[in-house]
């Protein structure tokens, strides 16, 4: 009588152990998947950050090189670099670059003509210091413009203008 009970208990305990191991493995697999996804997100975010920093440095060096040599190839390199600079900032609609004299050089748009959407006094002020302003383009929806100088060390090498999406402006106003 004792041997069948021990045998039955042993089989039952073995089945319970097998089920517990199966449940634990599923939980560990789920936790590992979540951790893997988080690690991949962190790697992607860090990659985007490094890409943005690298792109900004390439942009600065190209701007200096263009200023010193006048090589048109540097404009092409800046144009190719701008999407990487813009990529981490989903709400940036357009970025434009101008030299230290205030001449437009390149933009995320195809055409460089008329890339500065504000009047001359606002543009001149934005070349000197960080500036945020609103403007109303032909599309009649108000846009947000951020402008400021670009420095390499202590030397101003040019400037940047960023036009933000309408959603950015709406979220700022809604939070206010």
Image (cartoon, helix red, strand yellow):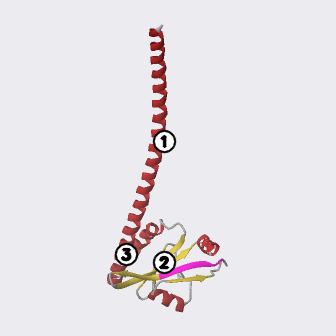
- Describe residue 132's horizontal placement relative to residue 82 as left or right: right
Q: Nearer the viewer, residue 118 or 77?
A: 118
Residue 60, given in percent of the width and then of the height, sits at 37, 76
Q: Nearer the viewer, residue 31 or 164?
A: 31
Q: Residues within 10 Å of mark 3 (few under 14, many from 20)?
A: many
User: Label 1's element?
Assistant: helix
Vertical placement of residue 45 versus 154, above or below: above
* Region rendered in magenta: 141-147
Q: Residue at x 44, y 43 (%)?
A: 32
Observer able to see residue 72: yes
**Would you say the residues marked 3 and 1 are in contact, meaning their CB atoms lie under 8 Å apart?**
no
Q: Residues within 10 Å of mark 2 (few under 14, many from 20)?
A: many
Q: Residue at x 60, y 74 (%)?
A: 172
Q: How many numbered tags mark residues here?
A: 3
Residue for badge 1 = 30
Residue for badge 3 = 74
Residue 58, given in percent of the width and then of the height, sits at 36, 71
User: Which quadrant of the figure contains the C terminus?
Assistant: bottom right
Q: Nearer the viewer, residue 74 or 125?
A: 125
- Label the magenta part by its dominant secondary structure: strand
What label sits on residue 64 in the rendered view?
A: none
85 within the magenta span = no
**Would you say the residues marked 3 and 2 are in contact, meaning their CB atoms lie under 8 Å apart?**
no
User: Label 3's element?
Assistant: helix
Q: Nearer the viewer, residue 9 or 81?
A: 9
What label sits on residue 96 in the rendered view?
A: 2
Going from the N terminus, do you reach mark 3 or mark 2 first?
3
Q: Residue at x 41, y 64 (%)?
A: 49
């Amino acid at each position: 009588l004792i041997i069948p009970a021990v045998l039955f208990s042993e089989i039952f305990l073995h089945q319970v152990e097998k089920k517990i191991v199966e449940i634990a493995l599923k939980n560990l697999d789920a936790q590992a998947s979540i951790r893997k996804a988080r690690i991949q997100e962190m790697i992607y975010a860090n990659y985007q950050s490094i890409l943005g920093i690298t792109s900004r440095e390439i942009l600065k060096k190209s701007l200096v090189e263009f200023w010193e040599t006048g090589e048109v190839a540097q404009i092409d390199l800046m144009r190719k670099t701008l999407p990487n600079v813009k990529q981490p900032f989903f709400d940036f609609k357009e970025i434009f670059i101008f030299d230290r004299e205030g001449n437009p050089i390149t933009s995320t748009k195809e055409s460089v003509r008329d890339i500065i959407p504000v009047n001359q006094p606002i543009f001149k002020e934005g070349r000197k210091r960080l500036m945020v302003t609103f403007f109303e383009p032909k599309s009649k929806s108000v846009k947000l413009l951020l402008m400021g100088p670009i420095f390499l060390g202590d030397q101003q090498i040019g400037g940047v203008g960023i036009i933000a999406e309408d959603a950015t402006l709406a979220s700022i106003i809604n939070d206010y």
